[in-house]
Image (cartoon, coloured by chain):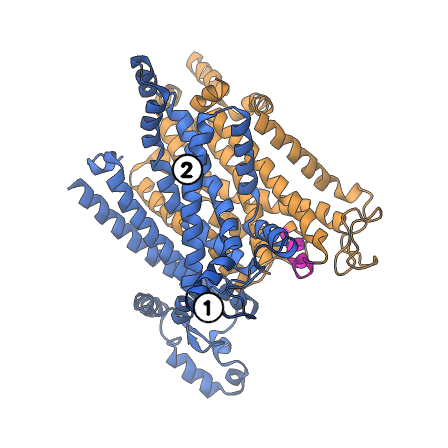
Amino acid sequence: MGLEKYIAERIIQAFFVIIAVIIINFIIVSAAPGDPIQFIAGDIAINSPEFATYLRHKWGLDRPLYERIFTYIFNIFQGDLGYSYRYLQPVSQLILERLPVTLLLMITSNVLAFIIGILLGLYSARKNGSFVDTSITSLNFLFWSTPSFLLGIILMMIFGVNLKIFPVAGLIDVRNPKEGFWLYLDIVYHSVLPIITLTLITMPLYFKVVRDTVIQQSVEEYAYMYRAIGFNESKIYKKVFRNAILPPVTLFAIHIGFAVAGAALIENVFGWPGVGRLLLDAISARDYPIIMGIYLFISITVVLANLIVDILYAYLDPRIRLQKIS
Amino acid sequence: MAKTKVITIMSKKIGIFSNILNIIQNIINDKYGFTGLVILAVISGLGILAPYLPIPDYNSIEFPRLMPPSEQHIFGTDYLGRDIISRTIWGARISLSVGIVAAGIASIIGIILGTIAGYYGGLLDNIISRFTDIFLVIPGFFLALTIVAIYGSNLYLIMIIIGLTTWPATARIMRAQVMQVKEFLYVEAAKALGTSNLRILIKYVIPGAIQPAIANTILQIGNAIIIEAGLSYLGLGDPNFPSWGRIIYEGQPYIASAWWITLFPGIFLVLTVLGLSFIGDSLNRMLTPKIKVSTKI
């Protein structure tokens, strides 16, 4: 009963968060300066009031506010994120077309950061206070303090422009297009630098929480108890590790939004044709439906990802599984 | 009367103001904290003294364009012939102001909401906590980006928006702390003496619970600086103020030939955020005695 109730609560909560996100989005649009009709029709709307009235009616702008909010929410739940007047395509279609290459960056780098961060954290905690630990910790602080785009620029300058080991920008080699397997290999080759950048930026998060938790846990009573019984340190370490693995899982959920932001900025550094690049183009062209659509899409994805991690977490953590939700 | 005296003394012991020297002492003793303080002191010192330093006006375009670092221009000049060291030092003023104002707004909202939720509990707590959860999940960077893209790039708007999107972490931390502190005996005693809730909160509960929130605020300053730099990098920064992000953005087209435009403000930005992270983390470790004890072994 406990687990089902917990999951049900989470789903209801996620639903309300999505509604809240949509309403915030709606308020931002409605309160924006300028007449939306002018955005749609430009000068024609000023010259021809009849046309403006027609458009106002067509887009439902003459209806009361509450009715418009409901229509808006209803449309979004049907996957309608609006219409880009620059590309003359639905925003959702534009996003979905560019999503796979963005996911390639995001998923790879986050999984790598998660694994490397945890391993380094465990290692560093074990060598607590040593020179190695201080070096690893300081390096992690350094990467944590560097904006993703700046690290991207630096890596691009070193490995792309000067050493010429990796391509500077783009998804594929346009001058020398390849096919089949080699095309995928080319994409992987082009993705190395952006993925390294994102991994280095995200890693400190997991490193720090694991290192702190392990150090904290290794002076808990149970660790002393094991020590007193005569367990050797590596066995105690295994017990400590089990308790140190939960916090990074929670972080993984909380920082999905952060990861998307990092990816969007990095795409612009490396000319990666993903959602982040679409966003930058939309900003410079003032294509508001795309900006709003991407914001909504990312927010909803983050909420859903959080929901999934919350449910997974419930299975992992016996305190929740066994119905003792604090 | 005697009882009030005891309460005052006890609350003084945990009061932030009487403890401030002790905190600084502890940060200085910590190698990370000390490094952070030194870095921050140098950079903010430069920023504060910017108008009095012998550097050219940051908007002056009288110098040769895209000059590499030299004796006259230690950090070189940019595509309009502006002196980069001058812009970078003035950038410290602007970026640090953005960080402090945004983190200040965020922590005021977070501390007030967190305190109310933690102290009163019940329905009020439930409403505030749900509200916090919503804002915790919404990706703040994109919300800020969307609003700035639509309403225009104004430095003050950027500060306020960053502040309004980053408060939930502080609210959560404050709530958890207040829930602990309100169970302490001196708070009970103050209640028993008939002290008003507002007075208890301001004199006893908030001073006792605020330290983790302060540590978090210091980390938030760095975070806000990075968010502003990210917005600037996407071309959404205020063109009238040379924040570090703005200088990097303007140097981007010339990155292959004039690396100095990007590199120097970049180093300043990273060092500042690093210093803030060191201090914030040092404070956090100080507040978690177990980690502190174990690092000394």
Q: Chain of mark 1?
A: A
**Left or right of A228, for residue B263:** right
Q: Secondary structure at mark 2?
A: helix
Q: Examine the residues drawn in magenta and state their main secondary structure.
A: helix
Image x and y of residue A264, in percent: 49, 57
Characterize the local packing of mark 1: few (<14), some (14-19) or many (20 or more) Cα atoms within 10 angstroms: many
| Amino acid under disc 1 | Ile
Chain seen in orange: B
Instruction: Read off the residue under disc 1.
Output: A290
**Left or right of B267, for residue A81:** left
Residue stretch in magenta: B245-256
Residue at image point 69% right, 60% down: B254
| Amino acid under disc 2 | Ile
Pick the quarter of the image with the C terminus of chain A.
top left
Does the magenta run of residues contain A41? no
Image x and y of residue B166, in percent: 48, 46
Image hue for chain A: blue
**Left or right of A316, for residue B79:** right
Q: Nearer the viewer, residue B183 or A25?
A: A25
Residue at image point 58% right, 46% down: B225
Q: Which mark is residue A118?
A: 2
Image x and y of residue B54, in percent: 83, 43
Does the magenta run of residues contain B254? yes
